[in-house]
Amino acid sequence: MPPAAQRIELEPIGHVRTAYQKMEDTPIQTRRNPAEPGRLVVEERYADALDGLEGFDYVHLICFLDQAWAADGRGTRPFTGERLRPVPFLLQHTGQRVGVFATRAPVRPNYLALSLVRVVAVHGNQVDFTGVDLLDGTPVLDIKPFEPHLDVPGYTPGSGWLDQVRGGWYQRHAVAANPLVRPGRKGLEAAGLDPATIPATHPAREDSMQLSARNQLSGTVRRVELGAVMAEVTVDVNGQEIVSAITRSSAERLGLAEGQPVTVIIKATEVLLGVED
């Protein structure tokens, strides 16, 4: 069965308590209603999972918009035609339509919401927060902490108020400077996965990108020189050195390092690099 055809079932880890009972009265973003208090109530069996959360100023709540789902035929209506291009709340005065994936509209294929809220206190299985844009009783599927180093593109120390945002354990022990890019099998095991269940390779997708063998070569990284913005990567291809200039962020994202095998793609005057997932 192709990945796109698989059915995924999720179970809420808790729900939020807010003052809102009607969709039409609920604020559209936490940023537009930052001071109003709300409460997250987590299932008792997950209470220990909140350990350390109070060290973060902000967290993302990943929620299922159950009332929008119910009002939309409980997900039975196909997403076709103009439903793929709704009118965002903030463009009602113009009537302009935008692709649903370019909006935060509540009516979407999986009815998921992402709310960035400010943590006030954690006690037992409850989290008091401010910044409300959810209906009372909205199911919460997951919680993930917000941290400027991870969530703000281009963030560097000296970025004003962002420097004051507490990032819990991430900002201790020089974690932010840790160069680790990929977890490795040991990291996955430490995160809780059973070693026996970790696949050696990822199943190939039917829509995997195909490249012409004429300009696709295999090589090994010899040097990586990181600049403030750009990186210069020297690759040995059958004894010949080829240099690729890419952005520093791309080099870090790919985890490029000396001795790493890479795929070199020659495109006109450009040299592109690829690594195995």
Image: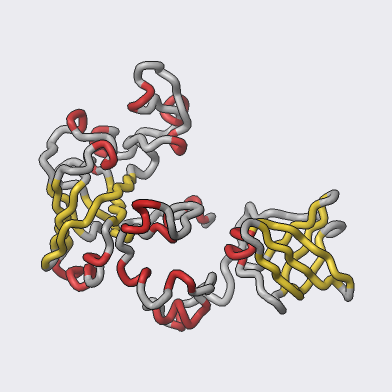
- Name the residue nearer the viewer: 23 or 223: 223
Q: In the picture provided, is 152 more to the left or to the right than 120?
A: right
Q: Is residue 108 above or below residue 249?
A: above
Q: Position of residue 33 (x, y in %)?
A: 22, 38
Quadrant including the C terminus = bottom right
Q: Position of residue 12 (x, y in %)?
A: 24, 57
Establish if 177 lies above or below 251: below
Q: Position of residue 220 (x, y in %)?
A: 76, 74
Image point (84%, 57%), residue name: 215
Q: Quadrant of residue 25?
A: top left
Picture residue at 45% right of the left edge, 55% below the top = 6
Left or right side of 245 for 9: left
Residue appearing at x 32%, y 58% in the figure:
164
> For residue 23, which quarter of the picture?
top left
Q: Position of residue 266 (x, y in %)?
A: 82, 56
Q: Nearer the viewer, residue 170 or 209?
A: 170
